[in-house]
Amino acid sequence: MNKIIKKPAYIALTAFLCFGFVGMLSYLLVSAYNMGPTPLDLAVLEFMVSIRNDFLNVVVAAITHCGDTVTIVALCAILVILPTRKKYGFPLTIAALSGLAIYKPMKHIFLRARPDVMYHIVEQGGYSFPSGHTTSSIIVYGLLLYLIRKHCKNETLKNVLSAVCIFLACLIPPSRLYVGVHWATDVLCGIFVAFGVITLVIAVLERIYGKNESL
């Protein structure tokens, strides 16, 4: 009984801490830097530029495109069409839309400019804060990892798909820094928005699965 009582509290605390960090970071950037780059942002951008080479440019650009809106929408659409839509497509789409509903308004509230176009390896318009690619990729690939571990029965397929999800969820955020279209604090904020959303979505799913198992 204690576990049943404490679990929602831990979930709520985790989500609160994630969104609380987002609020504090946003306030700091506005009050101390007027949404300009921080010393950390400048240092990370300088480092990323210093390690660039032709091979890495191609590889990292390919990785970052896996977090594009078109890619995310296509993935969700395919999973919604498949017979397993209730297990994968619907939860993933709802989670992705939840992330979008948070980061998109934030971009238009804070109006933060991206790093100078001279640093860009890929074309990217719009505002910088927070990183939409980071938010979407962690939510979608992170939640997909959870759903695969929960539902996939084929152990080999489960492990392969899990590795792909981990790879993309971990590498797309730093790829945004390498290609020069985001500041480090954009990505950091996107990470915490994503963790806040994914924590709440998984909590809801666990509650649904628990109810179904008890029927």
Image: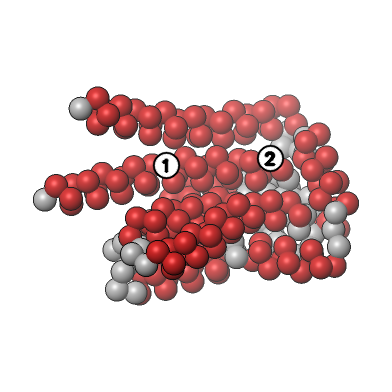
Residue 3 position within the rendered picture, expressed as x and y whole percent measured from the top left: 27, 29
Residue 123 visible in rendering: no
Label 1: how many Cα within 10 Å (few below 14, some 14–19, many 20+): some
Q: Which secondary structure lies at badge 2?
A: helix
Look at label 2 and name its amino acid. Thr
The earlier-in-sequence mark between 1 and 2 is 2
Q: Which secondary structure lies at badge 1?
A: helix
Picture residue at 48% right of the left edge, 53% below the top: 142
Picture residue at 73% right of the left edge, 67% below the top: 59
Residue 40 lies left or right of residue 73; in this view the side is right
**Residue sitting nearer the eye, 113 or 180:** 180
Picture residue at 14% right of the left edge, 47% below the top: 214
Label 2: how many Cα within 10 Å (few below 14, some 14–19, many 20+): many
Residue 138 visible in rendering: yes
Display coloring: secondary structure
Q: Number of numbered discs present?
A: 2
Look at label 1 and name its amino acid. Thr
Q: Disc 1 marks which residue?
A: 199
Seen from this angle, which residue lies furthest front?
Answer: 156
